Image (tube, grey):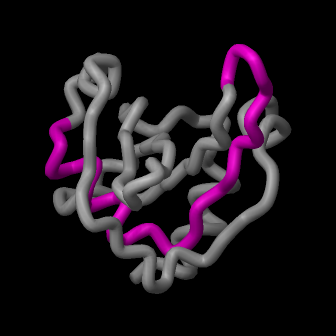
Amino acid sequence: MKHAAALGCVGHNKGTDYPGYSWTAGSRKHRVSRGQARHVVEHAGLYFVRPAVPPDRPDEALLFMDDDAHGTKLEVLGVELADGRLRVIHAMPMRPGYEPLYQEAHQWRQ
């Protein structure tokens, strides 16, 4: 499972309440709306940490996987900013390689 191998620790998403979001242009590449991405971040039971790998990826990223309000499985990747907001850098329909992580996170869904 190549996707999961690149991920580090897991955190429970209880109480993760971002004061706001920002969005990269690439976060809309796969036509996932901001509302869909927010729903996934706010309801995912767990998030998975992708460690930083300087210089190409200087910040650790958080991977959230859950269903949107209509039941579509999505993956959302974001970076926490210094001011507490989440910068969403990637959002798309979930790829099959993430199914085991989705199942793990789904049992903790909020």
The image quadrant of residue 11 is bottom right
Instruction: From this view, report whether residue 83 is shown above or below residue 75.
Output: below
Viewer-proximal residue, 54 or 27? 54
- Quadrant position of the C terminus in the picture: bottom left
- Residue 51, percent from left and from top: 76, 41
* Residue positioned 50% across, 54% down in the render: 64
Instruction: From this view, report whether residue 27 is shown above or below residue 18.
Output: above
- Quadrant position of the N terminus in the picture: top right
The segment highlighted magenta reads 33-57
* Residue positioned 72% across, 34% down in the render: 3
In this view, the residue farthest toward the front is 83
- Residue 28, percent from left and from top: 24, 25
- Residue 4, percent from left and from top: 76, 42
Magenta highlight on residue 53: yes
Magenta highlight on residue 27: no
Viewer-proximal residue, 71 or 77? 77
Viewer-proximal residue, 4 or 85? 85
Q: Is residue 56 toward the left or the right of residue 17 in the image? A: right
Numbered disc total: 0
* Residue positioned 44% across, 84% down in the render: 15
* Residue positioned 45% across, 48% down in the render: 81
